[in-house]
Amino acid sequence: MRIDVVTLFPGMFAAYLGESILQRAQAAGTLAIHVHNLRDYTSGKHRVADEPPYGGGGGMVLKPEPFFAAAEAIFAADPARRPRVILLSPQGRPLTHAVAAELAEEPWLLFLCGRYEGVDERVRAHLTDDEISIGDYVLTGGELAALVVIDAVSRHVPGVLGDEHAATRDSYADGLLEGPHYTRPENFRGWSVPEVLRSGHAGRIARWRREQALRRTWQRRPELLLAAELDEADRLFLLILAQETTGE
Ligand code: ADE
């Protein structure tokens, strides 16, 4: 997968993309990530990237020309195809597990990072295919959001995680939150690992994990249960949980 990013602050990407799983995926050639400085596509002596908004109101808006010039230079790198162009903004569609999996199917993504009060509307209307928000809060710019999307998407690209199937085991993959995990020591400060996990009984362990996931989802994000894939045993367990809660 190829990923390009256009930003006023390319230095913000180097540290995160230069470590751990994303670094290894790039070294292995599974991911090719290119970060471009929006400033390089500005013109004039002062290399201005932003201007006050028409109509007043304060703040600064990123100008359209540098975004179009940057995107067109990136398109020219491979004229036979086009990346999906994604603008990061608080007005975008919310990032979810399903959105990350969907974007991972694309061979080429281009992320445009906004700053200040926003980006000229013509960038959104005439250059962007998709607009994504990472949550209902406002960041100082799209850079962290782009990194979050890149990280979440990359985990779905075959070969990026050591274990091919790990992304399918995630919280959210089956619509439920994950239950607890334990490692050694068996007893830490008097808190011991649940007996079932030490039983060696694969069937009992799988059922326990499922019930822990259902319990955690019920307690923390009950609305997720409406869309989760549940079988008869799951439904029965939830009924018991509901009775516990109501004290019946
Ligand atoms: N830019 C500023 N805030 C953002 C958010 N919540 N998601 C994506 N991009 C943003």
Image: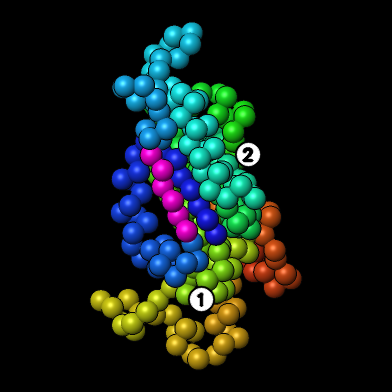
**Residue in the image at 72% along x and 69% along y:** 231
Residue 39 sits in quarter = top left
- Residue 112 image point, x, y percent: 49, 38
**Residue in the image at 48% along x and 48% along y:** 4
- Tell me if residue 106 comes above or below residue 95 in the rendering: below
- Tell me if residue 147 comes above or below residue 69 in the rendering: below
Q: Earlier in the sequence, mark 1 or mark 2?
A: 2
115 within the magenta span: no
- Residue 67 image point, x, y percent: 49, 32
Classify mark 2: helix, strand or loop.
loop
Q: CA distance from mark 1 to mark 2?
A: 32 Å
Q: Residue furthest top?
A: 55
Q: Main secondary structure of the magenta part?
A: strand
- Residue 36 image point, x, y percent: 41, 43
> Answer yes or no: do the residues labelled 1 and 2 have beta carbons within 8 Å?
no
Q: Which residue is mark 2?
A: 129
Q: Which residue is mark 1?
A: 163
Amino acid type, mark 1: Asp
35 within the magenta span: yes
- Tell me if residue 97 comes above or below residue 135 in the rendering: below
State the quadrant of the C terminus. Answer: bottom right
Q: Which residues are magenta?
A: 32-37
- Tell me if residue 60 comes above or below residue 28 in the rendering: above
Amino acid type, mark 2: Asp
Q: Is residue 152 left or right of residue 79?
A: left
